[in-house]
């Protein structure tokens, strides 16, 4: 899916936030993709790609306030959605995007098209808060994390109520850090 379809994806995500999540808009691969930061040490991704819901154990999900297990979402790409353990409408969706072979570099290559773009490091791995529409004030923040130089993962919380609604990017960062810790343990 090209990033041009993002307004439709964002609208779908907002409309379906209680019944599921839409796939995040995938950055398109380009020659400029190599302009992004490199992944310091590639993480194992076989489990992430084959079973995205297995990226957190029940205990790990609990430490970031999520009910386990997550629910697989294959509506457009193979991903997983976890509900908050304390507030049913709140959730986090994780989607690895293997078709974008430039990894986090693809996200960096598209930054001129984004409504917001903020580079970030998550547990030493390159990432960026970025999307073509800025829904952070409504409780949603798209975080992209490079897990290999060829694979980026999107983490999108949808916080509809509670104290974390004003900081969805912090929720995404905590989840991504737990995911990286889990993947590092598999090496």
Image: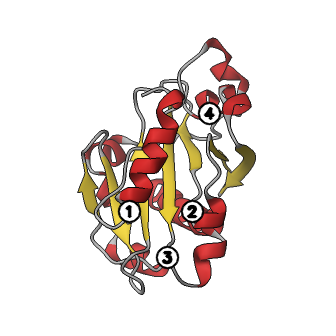
The numbered mark at residue 17 is 1
Label 3 packing within 10 angstroms: few (<14), some (14-19), many (20+):
some
Q: How far is mark 1 from mark 3, CA to CA? A: 19 Å
- Asked if labels 3 and 1 touch by Cβ distance under 8 angstroms, the answer is no
Residue at 44 percent across and 57 percent down: it is 14
State the image coordinates of residue 149 (x, y, percent, origin top left). Answer: 56, 31
Q: How far is mark 3 from mark 4, CA to CA? A: 26 Å
Q: Which residue is mark 3?
A: 64
In the depicted structure, whether residue 184 falls above or below residue 98: below
Q: Which residue is mark 4?
A: 107
Residue at 66 percent across and 65 percent down: it is 137
Q: Is residue 77 left or right of residue 172?
A: left
- Asked if labels 4 and 3 touch by Cβ distance under 8 angstroms, the answer is no
In the depicted structure, whether residue 134 falls above or below residue 162: above
Render colour scheme: secondary structure
Could you say whether the residue bearing mark 3 is in a helix, strand or loop? loop
First reached walking from the N terminus: tag 1 or tag 3: 1
Q: How far is mark 1 from mark 4, CA to CA? A: 24 Å
């Amino acid at each position: 899916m090209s990033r041009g379809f993002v307004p439709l994806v964002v609208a779908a995500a907002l409309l379906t936030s209680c019944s599921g999540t839409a796939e995040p808009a995938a950055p398109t691969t380009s020659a400029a993709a190599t302009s992004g930061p490199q992944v310091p040490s590639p993480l194992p991704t076989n489990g992430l790609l084959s079973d995205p819901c297995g990226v957190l154990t029940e205990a790990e999900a609990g430490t970031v306030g999520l009910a386990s297990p997550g629910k697989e979402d294959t509506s457009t790409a193979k991903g997983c959605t976890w509900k908050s353990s304390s507030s049913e409408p709140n959730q986090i969706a994780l989607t690895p995007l293997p078709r974008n072979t430039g990894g986090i570099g693809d996200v960096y290559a598209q930054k001129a098209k984004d409504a917001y773009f903020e580079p970030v490091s998550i547990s030493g791995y390159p990432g960026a808060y970025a999307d073509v529409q800025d829904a952070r004030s409504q409780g949603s923040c798209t975080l992209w994390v490079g897990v290999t130089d060829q694979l980026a993962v999107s983490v999108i919380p949808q916080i509809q109520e509670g104290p974390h609604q004003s900081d969805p990017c912090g929720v995404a960062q905590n989840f991504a850090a737990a995911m990286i810790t889990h993947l590092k343990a598999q090496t």
